[in-house]
Image: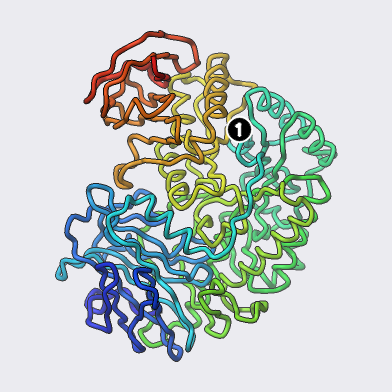
Amino acid sequence: MANLADPRRLWADGKAIDVHGVAVTRLTAGPAPTTLAAAGQGVIEVLGVESETTLVRLDVPLDGAVGFWHPAAGWDRHLTADWMATGLRTVGLVDSAPLGCLYDDAGRAVLAFASDRLVHTTRLRFGVGERAGRFGVWLAMDLGPGELCRIRIAPPGGAVAETVRSLVRRQSGTAALPVPEAGRVPAYSTWYSYHQEVSATAVEAEAELAAELGCGLLILDDGWQRGAYGGSYAGCGDWEPDPEKFPDFGAHVETVHGLGLKYLAWIAPLLLGDDSAARDRLAAFAPHARPEWRCHVLDPRHEEVRRFVVDTCVRLVDRYGLDGLKIDFLDAAMVYAEDSTRREEGTRSGGGVAPAEGVRPENGAGREDRANLEDHANPEDRGRPEDGGRPEDGGRPEDGGDVGESMRVMLTELRDGLMAVRGAELMIELRQPYTGPGMLEFGNLLRAGDCPADAAGNRVRTLDLSVAGRESAVHSDMLMWDPQASPQVAARQLLSVLHAVPQISVPLAQLPAAQRAMAGFWLAFWREHRDVLTRGALDAGRPDGLHPVVIARDATRAVVVHHVSDHAATLDPTRFAEIAVVNNTGAERVLLDLTHPAAVRLDVRDACGTPVRSETACLDPGPRWLAVPPSGLCLIRPA
């Protein structure tokens, strides 16, 4: 990859054009970027030459810019300097996306872009140039001779969420995997409840209680398979039910189905456990070791690996009557992108780029740990951008080729094989970071990365997923809380993700009566308001503010969730037949800023749904405090 480590190189002069006020400059040999013939599209084309990595810079004056958002931003959504490691990333099919938005203090886009290279790897750098007084984004791409990359630049001035969503719609040229009804209902997950200590008896008991609370989907996480013990992945690879935990797995799935729940099972198909029977057969295709997990990572560039993954997953769903899979650790494949970089380092002009140091993986350590890696793509495997970066003949990748292309082929075969078994009712859960636009055709349940008991983290991650699109079902990370906590405190985990599909993961049989009442009340509220919460327009403010107030609205209803009590929510009370104000704080009141006067009826309930008061009021325009109990609800309707 071209050298992204030297700021002097980053701000060098080159062949440039202007698109929507953004200077687009080619910094490596080759023709200058060009715009498409249709005026106003904001699409530029960059042509690959020889075998040299292509480096392109997008930059604008700083003006009023305050932050930069991208799909894997995590907590780092402020303005970083161009020399800082936080502004250096590798993106590809199973790790984020070549997409970002610089915004101002009003939450309006200043520089928003999306590249069509969703499959093959792009090395990104972004940040403030201290000497230039400008903000730059650099894209390093291994384009083959004659290969085109298209980069769309949005007009400035639009709201961040709307601008990004518009870019994503144009970025992905394939239809998203349809979401069945069962993918849009509250789910129960076994992970934080039981970790690997699951059994048919325990799961069936929890499933019955989950159905009573209003869940329609059960997700059996890690632990069901043979060899799952001690928190390791030593048994992964055989993917057979543990006969002691699940003596008759098929009958167990039927029992859960009989309770009215659909059933997904966890699988990490690229992990090959050190104790698995499959290890001897597949060890040659899994050279990268994860000793802390007691497993190796299968290399998807080998046809034998792709065939093993597809056959294993399809057999599991078909044999046991599952409704789909929760597919984990697909991003582990990126380790072989790093191998490709090491092999080619020094052979391309511009030299290699060292991985960023000190960057905390946005999914945390341990179970979600992953490296910050690079990939060098094989130019001969590339296709034109209108083909989504795929080989022009639609052929299969060669062994040892591009990781992204190999994953695309594998996931296409996997999706098609599972669809042949389950049809339109198929559900596939994917989690951050492999939830970018290029993955929408392979999974329909997009889950936030693991963030146990981190309500703010869950809120931010699910909103990041929602910004990129509302067509798929955005799921929260599994919700856990202290069973000894008050219902008001416990409720904050659930209220933080009302805009997403909640996944409950606490031992329901052990919940105190007050917590069970709380969960039942808020899940019933969520089901009643599901469409506006998950499909309505979202207003969540500036990304760097971490969304203190989130407003979801449709033509007749609005749901306002206050995550900070003294941050005002601006509303027109005359526009809606119902406004639901949710107080997701420990304060006794929230702040509204009304644009018009209105005579209304207020119905207030506490965290467990118990009525607190019901009254009529004349609301004057301007700021006003509204008394709502902690983790409580106020319904505002015309009087």
Q: Quadrant of the N terminus?
A: bottom left
Q: Nearer the viewer, residue 497 or 274?
A: 497
- Total numbered labels: 1
For residue 442, above or below residue 46: above
Circle 1: residue type: Ser
Q: Residue at x 35, y 26 (%)?
A: 574
| Crowd rating for badge 1 (residues with CA inside 10 Å; few <14, some 14–19, many 20+) | many
For residue 588, side relative to residue 398 (left or right): left
Q: Nearer the viewer, residue 334 or 273?
A: 334
Percent x, y of residue 384: 53, 79
For residue 628, above or below residue 22: above
Quarter of the rendering containing residue 195: top right
Q: Residue at x 63, y 26 (%)?
A: 214
Q: Nearer the viewer, residue 555 or 80?
A: 555
Percent x, y of residue 107: 28, 48
For residue 305, side relative to residue 369 (left or right): right
Mark 1: which secondary structure? helix
For residue 212, side relative to residue 482 (left or right): right
Q: Quadrant of the C terminus?
A: top left
Q: Which residue is mark 1?
A: 193
Percent x, y of residue 247: 84, 38
Quarter of the rendering containing residue 380: bottom right
Q: Residue at x 33, y 16 (%)?
A: 599
